[in-house]
Image (spheres, helix red, strand yellow):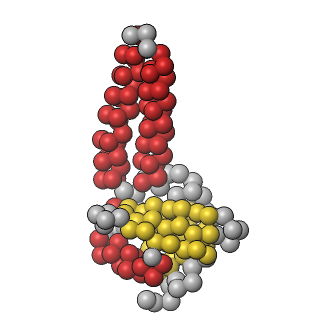
Amino acid sequence: MAKTEHYDLIQDRRGMMWDITLYVPTVAGLATGTMIFWFDQNQNLAYLLLFLACFFFYQGVHRVLGRLMLVPTSPVAIDISKKQVLLQLRNGKKTELVKDLRYFSDFAGKSFGLTGMDLLGKKRQFVFHKGQFDTEESFKKIGAALKIYA
């Protein structure tokens, strides 16, 4: 591995569409169930379904905005070295993961996670998707570079 490897991230529009097709029907179904049970005089189940609909709505919005890198704490660039991983965030700040750095890849090979402690001692977690890299080759290259932290 070279001294430092730099990767710029791009918006994952294809992944965003998959997330929308996953979350929109789920939230719509839960909201429909909420209305059915509310007017059927089963308010306890309606409250439960309303909670689940809101939960999946907020989770879906956060996931879609994260893939589009519109959340201020979304990483927009990664610098990898043997001792640390430097993440440049959308809000202009930089986060250095220096301690307890761990790399987690999924079985399908479409995403990976990074966790670690920053310089302030706060645990940070990030998820990166294959569509956020400009080529599949760069995604495989960063995965190989991060395997030392597995």
> How many numbered circles does the render carry?
0
Most extreme residue toward the right is 120
Examine the rendering and report whether any part of residue 147 can be seen: yes
Horizontally, residue 107 falls left or right of residue 70, namely: left
For the C terminus, the quadrant is bottom left
The residue positioned 47% from the left and 16% from the top of the image is 43
Identify which residue is drawn at 45% across, 65% down: 113
Q: Residue furthest bottom?
A: 2
Q: Nearer the viewer, residue 117 or 65?
A: 117
Q: Quadrant of residue 123?
A: bottom right
Q: Nearer the viewer, residue 47 or 64?
A: 47
Res 105 quadrant in image: bottom left
**Residue 138, can we see it?**
no
Q: Report which quarter residue 116 is drawn in.
A: bottom right
- Residue 20 in picture, x, y percent from top left: 34, 42
**Quadrant for the N terminus in the image:** bottom left
The percent position of residue 30, horizontal first and vertical second, equals 38, 28
Report the front residue among 47 and 119: 47
Q: From what the image shows, is residue 130 above or below residue 50?
A: below
Taking the spot 47% from the left edge, 27% from the top edge, the residue there is 48
Tell me residue 56's x, y (percent).
Answer: 44, 38
In the displayed structure, would residue 17 be above or below residue 120? above
